[in-house]
Image (cartoon, helix red, strand yellow):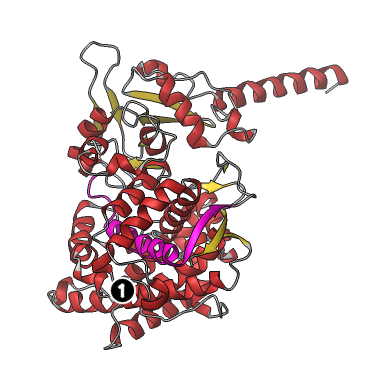
Amino acid sequence: MNQEDLYWFTFILVTLLGFFTYKLLTRHRSYFRLLRVPFERPHFLYGNLDDVLSGKLTTMEKLEQFYRKFSNHGLFGFFNYMTPALYVRDPALIRQLLQPNMSHFESHGYFLDEEKDRFLGCQLHLVNGAEKTTKMASFLSPIFRTPKVPCSMDVTTRRCCAALTDFIASRVELELELKAIFVKHTLNLFAGIAFGKELNTFEEETDRFCAVASGMAYGTNPVQVIKTMAFYLMPGFMRTVGVQFTDREEMDYLVKQYHTGASAPNLHSVARYLRQANGKMKPSEQLTDEQLSAQCAMFFTKGFEPTLNLLSFAVYELAQNPDVQRKLYEEMHHNGLTTGSATGVPPFESIRTLPYLEAIVLETLRKWPSHPLLVRECTKPFTIPATENGDRAAIPLKVGDKLYVSVWALHRSGDYYPEPERFSPERFVGKDVINAAQPSTFIPFGIGRGCLGQEFVKLMVKATLVALLQRFKLQPGERTPEPLQLIESASSLEARDGFWIRLEPRL
């Protein structure tokens, strides 16, 4: 081959490679146009994420822009890089599509499943199949939703809250980044509530349980990070060789912790209640010790970050809104709950009687939802019906397709919440509760059966807020900007500069 032929061969080869690469990258370009779904024209490489990649906005804030732009449509399209994503924005359409058809959308679209990890994969939010999901939900519901169960754990909660306030009191003259402190507090809480393990990470955080629990909550285990990459790149090979996501050693450690908590006669823990409930089932239907241990571990894999964020944002809003903080303290005083330094944190029965505290938690969940984006993966073929006026054709969904709901945009819509940027617990007080929580406009814990542990989480947060206000006045720190700046996070909301709060002792 002479030089001229080589030149033309190289030119043609590069042109063909470029052409087919472009076609590959833009193969979904007509997806929404063919369905007659409104969408923003994407860049062929990064889709609609230009402002996200530049750091100007988070994905949630970008979606909120499109949520407002397509306000006259029940659905809109969004390109996550090169992948089209179908968002359901209209509450009426959410009720019509998802709630009565949950059997078609059982999966939350999580990375883990029972094939990748038989231990974590048996947790309720990861279980696949209607029969398995229903069985697990019916087993766990009485434990998480019976009021007497969390109330029996108020001794653990009060001990942890006392450790938290004592730690803060020793540093109260400083401006504190409270989320880092709440990480330790939440570890103490969940270790005691789930496994009956008494930790005090403010004094000692080298316990092995801390490392294992933190790895589950944040995915910081380097071996698991490598496994995650391998599952994405070589899923078939990983299944063939039988690699499991959770290390055998960690699994055995957690089972041992479950046995210890379940066997302690004087400890009220989820581990103990799980063993009692399991013992009442038919032998053929009983869960294994690994499965029971995994349900305890769910506090860290599923509940840790939502609890931590709810608590952090609630304290931030109380500091930023002194009138709200004052009204809450007056409610506590009226109910005899402002003498914490003398009597300790009040029991759950007293905390449940505070309607304004409930409103503060609900308003925090509205403005800063723990799960800002909900994902439902199609598990059985489903067709979204066409609009009656013919604006949009029917949309066939196959197994594996996903529907998204931007809770962030929904909760910040002025159509349902006037002045949505304003923190106003009064939205959820008295008659306003009915008006604010319209069907499918307030969904901080998901769609369908929701989160089984939602009341559990709210109660832990309420107890902590009461403990803090008993001893301190909350004031905004100088290092936290207003309005709060967010950064991109995989599954939750993150404050760019943390939650810096100044705490003044009450006299």
Indicate the position of residue 455 as horizontal and vertical percent values. Answer: 27, 58
- Looking at the image, residue 99 sits to the left or right of residue 207; the answer is left
Amino acid marked by disc 1:
Asp
Residue underneath mark 1: 154
Q: Is residue 370 visible?
A: no
Q: Specify whether residue 433 is painted magenta.
A: no
Seen at 22% across and 64% down, the residue is 140
- Looking at the image, residue 483 sits to the left or right of residue 377; the answer is right
Look at the magenta stretch and give its main secondary structure. helix
Indicate the position of residue 425 as horizontal and vertical percent values. Answer: 34, 44
- Looking at the image, residue 378 sits to the left or right of residue 222; the answer is left
Quadrant where the N terminus is found in the figure: top right
Q: What is the span of residues highlighted in magenta in the rendered image?
A: 448-476
Indicate the position of residue 163 as horizontal and vertical percent values. Answer: 47, 75
Tell me: residue 174, above or below residue 107. below
Indicate the position of residue 489 as horizontal and vertical percent values. Answer: 53, 46
**Residue 276 or 200: which is nearer the viewer?**
200
Q: Is residue 455 visible?
A: yes
What is the crowding at mark 1: few (fewer than 14 residues within 10 Å), some, or many (at least 20)? many
**Residue 293 or 245: which is nearer the viewer?**
293
Seen at 60% across and 52% down, the residue is 477
Q: Specify whether residue 468 is painted magenta.
A: yes
Element under label 1?
helix
